Amino acid sequence: MQSAMEGFVRFVLRHRLAVLGAIVLATIGFAALASSLKVAISSDDITPMSHPYMQTMRKVRTTFGTEAPFIVVFTAKPGGEHAMIDAYRSFAHALMLEPTLKHDSFRSLISDNVKLITHSDDGISVTGFLDNLPPDGPAALDEIARRIALSPSTAKVFQSRDQRALALFAEFRDAADGYSAGNKRLLALLDRQKSPYFDVQIAGQNATLAAIEAFSDRMAIFIPLAILIIGLIHYESFRTWQAVVFPILTGVIATIWGVGAYSALGLGLDPITALVPILVLAVGAGHAVQILKRYTEVFEEGVRSGRAATTRELQDAAIATALGTVGAPLIAAASVAITAFLALTLFDTETVRRFGFLAAAGILAIIVIEFTLIPVLRSYLAPPGHQARSATSIWNRLTDIADWCARTRPKAVLGAAGAVFAASLAGIAIIRLDNSLHLYLSNDWPTNRANQMLDKAFAGADGFYIFIEAKPGRTLRSAQMLRAVATVQATVETDPNVTKTIALTDIVAEVDAAVAARDASARTLPSSDAAINDALTLYEISAGPEALEGYVTADYRRGIVRGFTDTARAKDMKRIEALIESGVAKAALASMARVDIGGGSFGPISLSDALVPEKILNIAIIMAACLLITLAVMRSVSLALLCCTPLFLSAAFVFGFLGFTQIPLMAPTATLGALCLGIGADYAIYIVWRLRAETRQHTVDEAISRTLATSGRAVLFVASAITGGYAVLGLSFGYHVHQWMALLVGVAMVVNAIAAIFVIPAAFRTLVAPQA
Amino acid sequence: MMSLRSFISTAAIVTAAAASAADLTAIDIMQKNFVATRVQDSVSEATLTLISGQGDTRKRTVASSSILAANGIDNTRLTRFTAPADAAGMATLTDEHMGGDDNIWVYLPAMRKTRRIQSADKGKPFLGTDFSYGDIMGLRVDDWNYAEVKSEACAPGTCYTITATAKTPSAASASGYAKRKLWIDQKSFVSMKMEGYDAGGQLIKRVTASDVKLVDAARQRYQPMRIVAENVLTAHKTEIHFTRYDVNVGVKPESLSVQSLESAN
């Protein structure tokens, strides 16, 4: 294998100009493809669409055109009441003229689907909530509150409990542009309403997603910054500019290739896939370090031996030999990493699949570049001077300590590793599984503050849907069916976090109360189908053709109950789900209709439900791939197991760390397993491969020392480069996902490096070498 | 009692209707348009098809009787829903007042009660359709400024195209339009197409008529048998298709009263 690789590298070097030209052309092509990519979230991509909750969401969207709205809240300052109401009305009008607005889900106090139904001596009145308000601002707010009190279905939805804030709900059609496009549209319209008399906030799930998109755009700053940090770390490690340029060039070009190939498939970046470029950069740089380190060693040996006639010959031979010797572990390590990331494509969530594909494409690109571009460029540049780092560097001290531990305290090292592993399992037991979108942002970020305000002052920023599909022969115009729906509503409303529910039942009850000239405060339904028909037809002919579109389909066979909650936490939503199911059972609704739960705050739950089994499968695939690939390369069961065992330790440690720190396991942090194991396998394979090679010529202790002094130090360089590269995400203030990834990748790299330089040599000396 | 303003308006309409179609001003055309579909009385049957932006349809069939008030402008109209079964039996009585609020009563068959519905303006939906009361009744000619009379080919032959702009914000608010663009058939003076715009100049509704029938040859009164109103913003639309439209059949005023609304059921 080594000679084949050397032969390939010599072939590349013989055709260096052609190879260089092809690489340049390919890079230009991939860069052109990559340039059109932008970060945009689609709700279909960030949730497992085969999950029942998400299938319900899709049905709600297809049938009622709604999903999760932006919630815009106008809050009057003292003396600004009238200005606020005018601005609210004017903004709602402007929004209705916005071409991309989803009219069927637009709900405001001036909408056709939000009408006040009242009775008086003159008869029934179906009017808008903001019609004919008193001119005095505070009196107008009081009047709105009075009207809302007459219409229980609107209570806490459109006006705050203290009456000073009004809300409206809007969604936009152009989901392909992401949520920030809708947010920008709202901001542009709100710009016209700017006033010192009131405040405006944008909340809701869509606003959170828009904020996440905006945070992901920060990658445009963080990627160059990561390149700079990785470069500085490499310079600190090698003190030569070539050691800076080669690794970064490898990472950058691999990133361009990977992202370009990804773009060619018509895929878009999202907040999770946007993290991949730094990963590819770091891994590419890491691989390049291993090659560079080996090349420098071989070149210096060549110089000392004086075998080659010219420097060019010496350099070409060193390039071929270096790649020939590190090629096998390099390809094996890359294969494990590629398998690790490709295993993510088995996830049900599109964004995780894309992360896996993009990362795998990037690593494949790294391998291609390392065997083509890097040898060619290397051959054009002057050979490196003898500028080894001083023996007192931190890397040397660490590898020296690892060497000492492996030689003198190997069992203690293994015991400590076992203790850490056991402790990590305890952490895993208390892991917090929560994909709530609120957790992505810091609590004091304006979107989260607005969401918190909605939770306190209104019915809440979150919610859910109950989708009801009547069985053949049944419709939602029947008294029996509506009573059952009302029972479900009453049951779920007993939950302390469910602030209210709205359904067709509420409209019928309000119209019936108006017709009967009584108070509508209780959800009292007419007892006969005929009376329900009266109420519904009366409402239809009075309120307009689209007045019921948000509640029921034209044939009255499908309807929704909208639930409002002041929570999006997984455990609360699970409890609410159980309550809905108990309400459905109590009302015997299932005998009349198919009932599905989903949407809104159930989206994150669906993700959580899918994550654990997928994560376990993912780790199992990575372990199996690592074992098989290392077995093929090492041709030794014990060495293959030696490569894989530290992966258990590092994976357990990282997930245990998640448990102890209560950083939630969610879609972005779930990618950490593949990242940790993929790169951990890299380190392990380099170390074990080198140990195997060194023990052929040296004693076990000497082999360990030599391995740690070469590959061990390279592992530390790579780990520090990846840690440094990801550390820039720690500067992403307000966005927890970036900051958690910065911390967790750092932890993963440290534990991977420790496992590689401490545990593997100790295990090699204690368990493998005596058998050999 | 008819106000002075209404009286002047009515007189102008009657005079204009008698005038020659040659050299017509925009006002002349609009006055002819106003009376073109006003019949002494009528008995009709129609299907109302409501089509949502998502393509869902709802159909209702109605039977109506109408009688023109003595002022030659306002109609009293009784409409009964005949299908679907869940709406059948419900009836509405509309007593139009061009210069003010209409009186609308609804008969609820299950409760055997009649309730008055308070109606604020002509921009409100007509029987829960995409048509407003103003689209069905017509809007006061005097409330609008007219411009740009041109001739343009249209479905039945040639149309006058006229741009009408509300004279006052209240006229715009009441009708739901700040501006209308009308295509009026030069022969029948029936509005074949109307585009309604809001104050910002955004097209918000489109009403089109077709299959125009001469229903009263003596008075030259016409009725389009098919009318479609489309809410441009939401893509929701309503089609009214008359399957019967008889005029001058001797509808008795007493048959169009609140009592008759209840007694017929």
Image: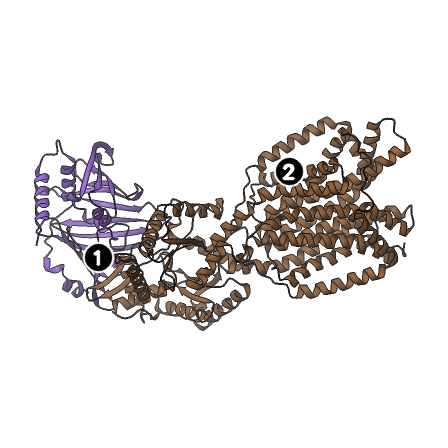
Chain colours: A brown, B purple
CB within 8 Å, label 1 to label 2? no
Rendered location of residue A384, percent (x, y): 79, 34
Picture residue at 66% right of the left edge, 30% below the top: A24
Q: Residue at x 75, y 28 (%)?
A: A380
Q: Outermost residue, bottom direction?
A: A586
Residue type at numbered disc 1: Ser
Residue A399, position in %: x, y?
A: 81, 50
Q: Chain of mark 1?
A: B
Q: Nearer the viewer, residue A491 or B144?
A: B144
Tell me the quarter of the picture where residue B168 sits. top left
Q: Residues within 10 Å of mark 1 (few under 14, many from 20)?
A: many
Residue in view at x 24 percent, y 53 percent: B126
For label 2, the SS is helix
User: What x and y, as percent, mark residue A153?
Assistant: 36, 64
- Cα gap from disc 1 to disc 2, whole angstroms: 66 Å
- Disc 1 target residue: B119
Is A59 left or right of A616, judged from the image as shown? left
Q: Name the amino acid, label 2.
A: Trp
Q: Quadrant of the N terminus of chain A?
A: top right
Q: Position of residue A618 (x, y in %)?
A: 67, 55
Q: Which residue is mark 2?
A: A257
The quarter in which the C terminus of chain A is drawn is: bottom right
Considering only vertical position in the picture, is A37 above or below A674? above
**Can residue A530 be seen in the rendering of this structure?**
no
Q: Is residue A2 left or right of residue A556?
A: right
User: Circle 1 — which element?
Assistant: loop
